[in-house]
Image (cartoon, helix red, strand yellow):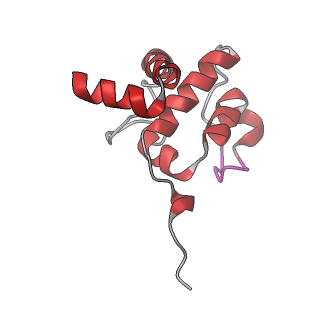
Amino acid sequence: MKQITILLSLLLGTELLADIEKGKAAYTANCAICHTVNGGRAMGPDFNIVSYTRTKEEIQQYAENPSSLYRKFGYSANAMPTLPLNEDDLSDIAEYISSLQPFKKWMVKKKI
């Protein structure tokens, strides 16, 4: 595990790694009750799927104001509450969620 952390530090930079770790802690404290990571049963979508289909900016934008954006993101109703988190916390959570999938849906090459 230590080797992976060192490798990630070199690849991502220590500041980004710190943001991801802070985001993971904020996720655990605020999001884990409704969202899983790596499958499971919960009210909200699994964050691996969210990470694959959304940009970091979209994730943060939705977390900041879910009641005004739920239709834009394809939901028929909004079950997500507005969380009492500051912008840095929301950014760290979005960074953590985005880090779960290194490859994104929009990276898939289209067949010609």
Q: Is residue 12 above or below residue 90?
A: below
Question: Does the magenta portion include 74?
Answer: yes
Q: Is residue 24 above or below residue 54?
A: above
Answer with left or right where residue 68 lies relative to residue 40. Answer: right
Question: Residue at left 73%, top 34%?
Answer: 67
Question: Residue at left 40%, top 29%?
Answer: 10
Residue closer to the observer: 11 or 43: 11
Q: Quadrant of residue 100?
A: top left
Residue closer to the observer: 101 or 69: 101
Answer with left or right where residue 84 lies relative to residue 3. Answer: right
Residue closer to the observer: 100 or 11: 11
Question: Residue at left 60%, top 17%?
Answer: 89
For this orientation, the residue located farthest to the bottom is 112
Picture coordinates of residue 48 (x, y %)? 42, 43
Question: Does the magenta portion include 35?
Answer: no
For this orientation, the residue located farthest to the right is 68
Picture coordinates of residue 9 (x, y %)? 40, 25
Picture coordinates of residue 27 (x, y %)? 47, 22
Answer with left or right where residue 104 lies relative to residue 73. Answer: left
Q: Quadrant of residue 61?
A: top right
Question: Residue at left 43%, top 45%?
Answer: 101
In the rendered image, the quadrant that contains the N terminus is top left
Look at the image and give the residue range highlighted in magenta.
71-77
Q: Is residue 47 above or below residue 86?
A: below
Residue closer to the observer: 107 or 14: 14
Picture coordinates of residue 8 (x, y %)? 37, 30
In the rendered image, the quadrant that contains the C terminus is bottom right
Main secondary-structure element of the magenta-colored stretch: loop
* Residue 1 in view of the camera: no
Q: Is residue 83 above or below residue 45?
A: above
